[in-house]
Image (cartoon, helix red, strand yellow):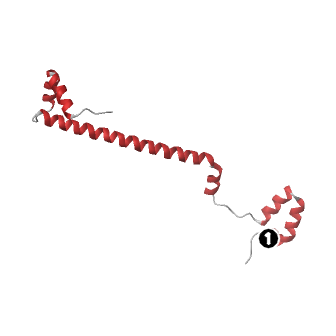
Amino acid sequence: MKLPSVFEYMAKLASNPQVAAEFAAATPGRSRLEAVQACHRLAVATLSEIEINKRKLALARAKIAALEAARKSAPVATRAAARPTKAESAAAKFSRLQKTDPRAAAAFYQENRLAILNPTPTH
């Protein structure tokens, strides 16, 4: 949005006496030029702040979109990484192998029978 210059504002006030009288009543103790310059500075500052906030909003939206995309791409991995993992005991592994692969369970039992039969170490 292009903001009119101070002199364009002064010309508009000079062309409309009713608006000039209202402006003079709203800004007592200042000359018309001082009041118009102050209003112009305020308008420029406000528009600048609006533009800065628009840029910040665009950056924040981009950051949120990136975080959402990252969350959607790996929701299971982040949940699994957040949980501490426990080592599977020999007895639990043997039990699982018995259900899925009895031959592997027999071989595992031969290698780890002491840990399976005595799950809590005594040393």
**Which residue is situated farthest in the bottom direction here?**
123
Q: Residue 94 vs residue 64: left or right? A: right
Q: Residue 115 vs residue 31: left or right? A: right
Instruction: Tell how many labels.
Output: 1
Q: Nearer the viewer, residue 48 or 81?
A: 48
Q: Residue at x 37, y 42 (%)?
A: 53
Q: With respect to residue 70, does 84 lie above or below?
A: below
Quarter of the image containing the C terminus? bottom right
Q: Nearer the viewer, residue 9 or 112?
A: 9
Q: Residue at x 31, y 38 (%)?
A: 47
Residue 66 in percent (x, y) is at 54, 46
Quarter of the image containing the N terminus? top left
Quadrant of the image occupied by residue 19: top left
Q: Which residue is mark 1?
A: 115
Residue 15 in percent (x, y) is at 16, 22
Residue 55 in percent (x, y) is at 40, 43
Residue 30 in percent (x, y) is at 11, 36
Amino acid at the residue labelled 1: Ala
Q: Residue 119 vs residue 29: left or right? A: right
